[in-house]
Image: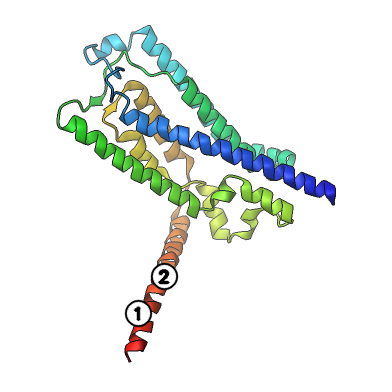
């Protein structure tokens, strides 16, 4: 009994430490991909692009090509980790070794890959921007608009993750169910939900697309980042009409639940008036 308790405590500790690391990495990723990209030059100390350099010259510059090669390698590292560990044979092999910590290990390696990408990302400052808002008053108002929309998108993403069973997504519920002897949390979900989760693990494609592309200036390295991640997001899911029908049914049920208290209060007031 004591050994079981110690093992459960160790699993919970590992899972919670991983959650803290993933949370910190998520905050760093928001700063890296969103807010730093909007206000990178607010102090005027850094130069994002060199519009005076022609594209024909910039694309032959060894420093530009070297930075793009490094960034492409970092993106390949992240995509390989994110896809390889989600591949069924690898997932089953890790499940047999790690057990309930399989999802925890996946989230940890994802956060680690993101930290490496953010730490060693090479900005391309020796090439022109594809677009850049620099003339007043849009140079002030457009970054503010981008900041507001980015903040809204990240708020929606966080809300969706919480509603989407965040503890299961991070691997915490797997460890909790293991300690209680309840098995895999996914086995307690209806078949339609299991099918949806198999086709799309985190449904935040539209919001991430806005965050990736809506910027006051788009540099060459940002084009590589946004284009690669957008393509990966578009190819990574396999939703179909059955998944859409299930989502519509669940949305209607949620709307009915929100409408029931209001309808109940209206009926109570009508009864009091009578």
Residue wearing tag 2: 256
Q: Position of residue 118 (x, y in %)?
A: 47, 25
As drawn, the residue found furthest toward the bottom would be: 274
Give the camera-side residue of 256 and 91: 256
Residue depicted at 45% across the width and 51% down the height: 160
- 128 in relation to 75, above or below: above
Residue wearing tag 1: 266
Give the camera-side residue of 159 and 238: 159
Q: Position of residue 166 (x, y in %)?
A: 54, 49
Q: Position of residue 260 (x, y in %)?
A: 41, 74
Residue depicted at 35% across the width and 42% down the height: 151
- 205 in relation to 186, above or below: above
Residue depicted at 68% across the width and 48% down the height: 175
As drawn, the residue found furthest toward the left would be: 136
Residue depicted at 37% across the width and 34% down the height: 34
Provide the secondary structure element on which disc 1 rests. helix
Give the camera-side residue of 43 and 41: 43
Query: Which quadrant would the C terminus be assigned to in this image?
Result: bottom left
Provide the secondary structure element on which disc 2 rests. helix
**Residue 85 seen in this snapshot:** no
Q: Badge 1, how many Cα within 10 Å: few under 14, some, many 20+?
A: few
Colouring method of the image: rainbow
Q: Position of residue 104 (x, y in %)?
A: 63, 41
- 183 in relation to 77, above or below: below
**Residue 146 seen in this snapshot:** yes
């Amino acid at each position: 009994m004591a050994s079981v308790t110690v093992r459960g405590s160790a699993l919970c500790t590992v899972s919670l430490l991983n959650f803290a690391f993933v949370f910190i990495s998520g905050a760093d990723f928001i700063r890296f991909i969103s807010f730093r990209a909007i206000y990178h030059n607010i102090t005027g100390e850094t130069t994002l692009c060199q519009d005076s350099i022609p594209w024909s010259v910039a694309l032959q510059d060894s420093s530009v090509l070297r930075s793009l090669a490094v960034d492409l390698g970092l993106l390949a590292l992240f995509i390989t980790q994110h896809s390889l560990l989600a591949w069924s044979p690898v997932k089953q092999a890790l499940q047999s070794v790690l057990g309930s910590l399989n999802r925890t290990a996946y989230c940890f390696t994802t956060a680690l890959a993101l930290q490496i990408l953010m730490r060693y990302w090479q900005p391309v400052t020796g090439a022109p921007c594809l677009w850049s808002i620099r003339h007043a008053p849009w140079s002030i108002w457009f970054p503010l608009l981008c900041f507001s929309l980015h903040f809204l998108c990240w708020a929606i993403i966080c809300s969706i993750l919480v509603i989407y069973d965040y503890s299961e997504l991070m691997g915490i519920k797997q460890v909790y169910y293991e300690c209680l002897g309840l098995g895999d949390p996914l086995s307690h979900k209806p078949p339609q939900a299991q099918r949806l989760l198999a086709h799309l693990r985190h449904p935040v494609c539209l919001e991430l697309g806005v965050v990736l592309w809506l910027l006051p200036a788009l540099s060459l390295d940002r084009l590589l980042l946004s284009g690669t991640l957008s393509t990966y997001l578009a190819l990574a899911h396999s939703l179909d009409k059955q998944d859409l029908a299930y989502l519509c049914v669940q949305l209607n049920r949620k709307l009915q639940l929100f409408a029931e208290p209001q309808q109940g209060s209206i009926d109570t007031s009508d009864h009091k008036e009578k």
